[in-house]
Amino acid sequence: MNLIIDAGNTCIKLAAFKGDDPVEVCRVDYDELSKFGRFTTSYPFRRGIVSSVVDMPQSLEAAIAALPFDVVRLVPGVTPVPLRIKYATPHTLGADRLAAAVGAYAKGEGREVLVIDMGTCITYDFVNADGEYLGGNISPGPKLRLKALNAYTSRLPLVSRHGDIPEMGDSTETAIRSGVVNGIRREIEGYISDFLLKYPRLFVYLTGGVHLDLHISEKMRIFADDFIVPYGLNRILEYKN
């Protein structure tokens, strides 16, 4: 079995894979590494892979080093992956973006794929039908947008993204929330529509912690998949071995 470790901005995601199939997925906060120990001893792991978009704390580094099997570190631009990377600066590519692209292309079975990851940032990554990762874009996520409106203005309050989202706000609170959430929805719908016009066989994979109701007709081509990053990491580990 394979152990997948995805260290993100807010938590650590752990996954146990048997072949291509996820057996269990677990979220662990950085201050509760006892869960990490319990998870990593719950299955007969033979190898693992770790991806990180943060500087991992020493406690997590020590826990990984103590594991009784080899753990590969995904280093973009260095670790072999089953895609041809056309990014101009591969060493600066986020490991989570790379893993998501690998996972989406594997699931897309040779089609063009667009991966949209909605978290702290919203990332858009594209792989063509020939398995070439051509790059993507990075945009602020909802929390960043809401915080920016509060931090860089004199009077706008800090608003939660949870609450009423009318088409047009009828108060400052709903105007901010609707502007941010509806703006993100229209941004994502615009990306999908533009890519579908250029690539009619395109598959779109949505992942991350933010979920939106998209108003777009081609929903049969759009898949919500919270496992796309760990799936891609597992594919990279299998590819390396």
Image (cartoon, rainbow, N blue to C red):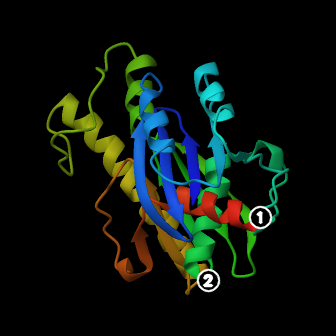
Which image quarter: residue 32?
top left
Which image quarter: residue 92?
top right
Element assignment for label 1: loop
Q: Position of residue 113 (x, y in %)?
A: 59, 73
Q: Position of residue 181 (x, y in %)?
A: 32, 46
Which image quarter: residue 186?
bottom left
Q: Which numbered circle lies on residue 241?
A: 1
Q: Is residue 231 above or below residue 66?
A: below
Q: Is residue 157 above or below residue 226?
A: above
Element assignment for label 2: loop
Question: Observer-nearest residue: 130 or 95?
Answer: 95
The residue singled out by tag 2 in the image is 111
User: Disc 1 vs disc 2: Cβ atoms closer than 8 Å?
Assistant: no
Q: Is residue 43 above or below residue 110?
A: above
What's the residue type where badge 1 is placed?
Asn
Cα separation between marks 1 and 2: 25 Å
Mark closer to the observer (1, 2):
1
Residue in view at x 65 percent, y 44 percent: 50
Q: Position of residue 125 (x, y in %)?
A: 62, 60
Instruction: Count all numbered tags in the image, as a single digit.
Output: 2
Tell me the crowding category of disc 2: few under 14, some 14 to 19, or many 20 or more residues within 10 angstroms, Cα based: many
**Dividing the image into 4 quarters, which one contains the C terminus?**
bottom right
